[in-house]
Structure formats: C-alpha cells, structure tokens
Image: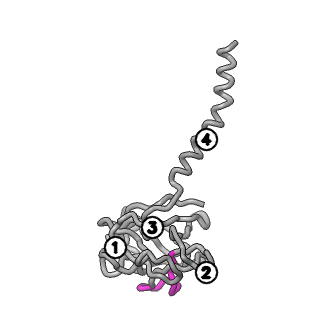
Amino acid sequence: MRTRIAKIAAVAAAPLLAITLGAGTAHAGYGAGEIRFNGGYCLDVSGGNFVSGQKVQIWGCNGTSAQQWWLRTKDATHFEIQASQTYDPQGRLLCVNNWEGGDVTGNHMRLYPCDSGSAGDTQFNFVYAGNARQLQPRVASTNCINSWGGLSQGAEARLYPCSHSVEEDIVSYPSITS
C-alpha cells in the first residue's frame, strides 16, 4: 500500500517538478549581459553616461554597466536593446535607437527612450550572413550595426551593409526576454 501511495505521489508531483525546473531554466538567462563582437569587443555606452542622445560605441569588453544590455521581446522576431541603467530625468528606459531613421548607411546608434520614435528604429532582429549573426534595425533591409572604421576602442556603432565581417558579427548576447 505504501509503495502504491508513493508511486501515485511521484506521478502527481512530476508535472509540478517539471514546471518548477522549467521556470528555473527560463529565468537563468534573464538579466543584462554583453553584446559581444569578435576580438573581445562589446557594444558600449560612451563614457558609461546613460542619458538620452548618448553615443553607442564599440569598446573592449570589460564587464562594466556600460556594456550590460537587456534584449526585450516586442514580437515574434523583433526586440529592443535596453540599456542596463538610465539617468533619464523622467525615469524612462533607454534603448539603442537608429536615431536618424531608415535604412541608411552611416546612420548613428544612440540611446533614446524606448518609447520614443518609430518602432522601426528602436526594434532590432538578427540576420545571418555566412554562419554569423548581425543586428539589424526593423526598418532596415540591407544595413546592420557595424563597428564603423574597424574594431577598435571607441569606434562608433553605425549602420553599414550587412555582411559576414568582424565589424558586424555578434558572437554572444544576453537571452531575449519578455
């Protein structure tokens, strides 16, 4: 009788255990993380100054808050790149923004409130060239975020035609969350 009760309890507990373990796994990826390019470079907030209009650049990965990002789901294929901190006077979240708008080579990436501007300029998706992934604004069809002028300290994050190049290939990024 005890064996039968133990088996029934085990069967009844299995779904609860699966839900609990599943939730732990899903939350393990939550949190900010680095968006890494080749050569040990990361997407970075210039000077660690989290204000509206601030330049987004490429900098050697160093684990500071200037290189911590959340990727927040907006729909099935697009996400916002939210800064880990904000000094916005209204307390708004800041996101990477294709602030000049459109699919134009040379456009600069800046921090602006996530809810400002067009969704096409504040939302991104991954595209693939070769066996690597690149970040592309929703509004773009040919351009991706690029380390303008080559991978180096302080290179501006700007749009350039998507290609399998060290200046664009993303080698790691935080989990995309809702």
Residue 143: quadrant of the picture: bottom left
Q: Where is residue 151 in the image (x, y as percent from the top left)?
A: 31, 74
| Left or right for 86, reference 173 | right
Question: Which residue position holds label 2?
Answer: 116
Residue 11 lies left or right of residue 83; in this view the side is right
Decide which of tag 2 and tag 3 comes sooner along the chain.
Answer: 3
Q: Which label was assigned to residue 167?
A: 1
How many other residues sit within 10 Å of disc 2, few (<14), some (14-19) or many (≥20)? some
| Mark-to-mark CA distance, 3 and 4 | 31 Å
Question: Which residue: 55% across, 70% down?
Answer: 80
Which is nearer the N-term, disc 2 or disc 4?
4
The residue drawn where x is 45% and y is 67% is: 65
Q: Where, by quadrant of the figure, is residue 86 drawn?
A: bottom right
The front one of 71 and 127 is 71
Q: Residues within 10 Å of mark 4 (few under 14, many from 20)?
A: few
In the rendered structure, the answer to whether residue 17 lies left or right of residue 154 reads right
Residue beneath disc 4 = 20
Q: What residue type is labelled 3?
A: Ser
Amino acid under disc 1: Glu
Q: In which quarter of the image is the C terminus?
A: bottom right
Q: Name the residue under label 3.
A: 65
| Tag nearer the camera, 2 or 3 | 3
* Number of the front mark, 3 or 4: 3
Helix, strand or loop status at disc 4: helix
Precedes in sequence: disc 4 or disc 1: 4
Visible residue check, residue 129: yes
Q: Does the magenta stretch include residue 100?
A: yes
Q: Residue, x 55% and y 75% (percent of image)? A: 94
Span highlighted in magenta in the image: 96-107
